[in-house]
Amino acid sequence: MMYGYGIGWGWMMLMPLVWIVLLAVIVWAVVRLVQRPGDRTPPQRRETAQEILDRRFASGEIDADTYADARARMAGREPSPR
């Protein structure tokens, strides 16, 4: 007689794996909950000086002369006299 131990060996081999998976899920959940909201977002690329200048010119914050002078300064050239 087997006294109900027919699948006992299978469960005995599977239980350590079940516990490892369960502990891994718990650790993952705790780490995920402890993280700050800012840590979850990917870092954003900073605008270059040229992109900022282009955006300000396109939105009308600076005029064409100021834009041309700033571009010349960034390129290392002297701005044209007015």
Image: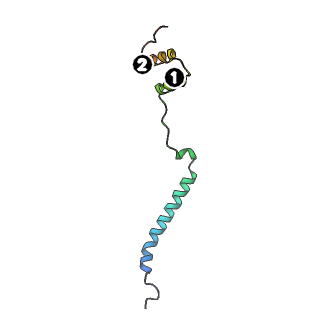
The kind of residue tagged 1 is Phe
Q: Look at mark 2 in the image and give the residue it sits on.
A: 75
At label 2, counting other C-alpha atoms closer than 10 Å, the crowd grade (few under 14, some 14-19, many 20 or more) is few
Residue 26: x percent and y percent? 53, 61
Q: Nearer the viewer, residue 60 or 10?
A: 60
Return the residue at label 1. 57
Asked if residue 76 is positioned above or below residue 34 in the image, the reply reads above
Question: Looking at the image, which is closer to me, 22 or 75?
Answer: 75
- Residue 28, compared with residue 52, is above or below; it is below
Using the numbered discs, state the Cα–Cα distance from disc 1 to disc 2 in whole angstroms.
Answer: 17 Å
Check the image and name the residue furthest to the top.
Answer: 82
38 sits to left or right of 81: right
51 relative to 41, above or below? above
**Image quadrant occupied by the N terminus:** bottom left
Q: Amino acid at mark 2?
A: Ala
Residue appearing at x 53%, y 45% in the figure = 39
What number is the disc on residue 77?
none
Q: Position of residue 70 (x, y in %)?
A: 48, 18
